[in-house]
């Protein structure tokens, strides 16, 4: 199966950031954890550990969009941030909990779990970039997660090594390859270009690239946390 077209806009901010961070980006999107989901060889204990930490991650993801509303300087951006936060709290969290139930995971137990070091590292990095910087800094830090999952799923579907039949990770792959999620990722890419133009991103590219590279590196660390069952 051929991969869908690359979501990145040629010459756009996301494409340039990804090119600047290519080694770290590739380690993230082609991590052994990802490959293990594709061929079904990933130990199920590693995936369960990832799911629990991803539940905790989503809580801070919602906080990041609350921060985006605070950092916004117009009603349109405030409303967009509010919609994203509501979607996480009112829809995505519920979907994640139900998905986790299929893996024998209970929400109360997940909520009581200690955050792994990799979860702390990435979520607090995103929040710190938003607090120290502006809306563009925050969305650049969020982009590897939002866009990266769409690219990962598309790559897996196009990879001859990927096995879908009988693969316990097939629902995860198909969820992030779904056109609805790709629309979310494309909207994030378009938002980066708009904020880049409005907030002088060209003059700040080196700083933004450092943020994007660090976020990509931390995302790879999140996969490694799952693979190592690390806390």
Image (cartoon, rainbow, N blue to C red):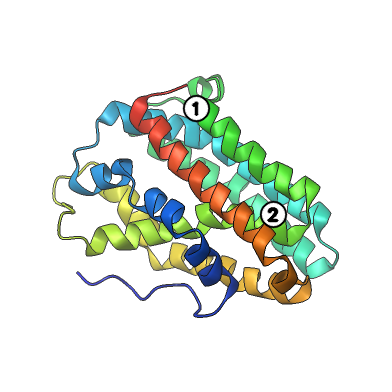
- Mark 2 touches mark 1? (CB < 8 Å): no
Q: Is residue 144 left or right of residue 68?
A: left
Q: Which residue is mark 1?
A: 107
Point out the frontmost of discs 2 and 1: 2
Q: Which mark is residue 138?
A: 2
Height in image: 172 above or below 147?
above
Give me the residue at 45% from left, 57% from top.
Answer: 148
Residue 175's x, y, as percent? 37, 55
Height in image: 152 above or below 62?
below
Q: Quadrant of the N terminus?
A: bottom left
Residue 92's x, y, as percent? 53, 47
Q: Nearer the viewer, residue 192 or 57?
A: 192
Height in image: 96 above or below 200?
above
Q: Nearer the viewer, residue 32 or 40?
A: 32
Q: Is residue 19 left or right of residue 189?
A: left
Q: Earlier in the sequence, mark 2 or mark 1?
A: 1
Near mark 2 (Cα within 10 A), the count class, few <14, some 14-19 or many ≥20, is: many
Q: Nearer the viewer, residue 139 or 70?
A: 139
Please tell me whether mark 1 sits on a helix, a strand or a loop. helix
Give me the residue at 15% from left, 54% from top.
Answer: 161
On the question of residue 104 being in view, the answer is no
Give me the residue at 65% from left, 45% from top.
Answer: 126
The residue positioned farthest toward the bottom in the image shown: 10
Q: Quadrant of residue 202?
A: bottom right
């Amino acid at each position: 199966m051929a991969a869908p077209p690359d979501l990145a806009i040629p010459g756009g901010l996301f494409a340039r950031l990804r090119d600047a961070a290519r080694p770290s980006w590739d380690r993230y999107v082609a991590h052994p954890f990802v490959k293990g989901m594709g061929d079904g060889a990933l130990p199920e204990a590693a995936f369960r550990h990832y799911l629990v930490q991803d539940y905790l991650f989503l809580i801070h993801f919602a906080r990041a969009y609350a921060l985006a509303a605070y950092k916004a300087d117009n009603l349109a951006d405030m409303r967009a941030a509010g919609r994203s936060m509501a979607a996480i709290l009112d829809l995505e969290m519920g979907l994640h909990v139900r998905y986790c139930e299929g893996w024998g995971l209970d929400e109360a137990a997940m909520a009581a779990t200690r955050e792994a070091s990799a979860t702390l590292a990435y979520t607090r990095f995103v929040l710190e970039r938003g607090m120290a910087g502006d809306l563009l800094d925050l969305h650049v830090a969020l982009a590897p997660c939002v866009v990266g999952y769409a690219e990962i799923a598309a790559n897996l579907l196009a990879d001859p090594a990927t096995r879908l039949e009988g693969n316990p990770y097939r629902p995860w792959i198909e969820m992030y390859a779904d056109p609805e999620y790709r629309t979310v990722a494309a909207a994030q890419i378009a938002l980066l270009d708009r904020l880049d133009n409005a907030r002088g991103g060209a003059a700040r590219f080196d700083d933004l690239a450092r943020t994007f590279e660090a976020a990509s590196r931390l995302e790879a660390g999140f996969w490694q946390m799952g693979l190592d069952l690390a806390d």
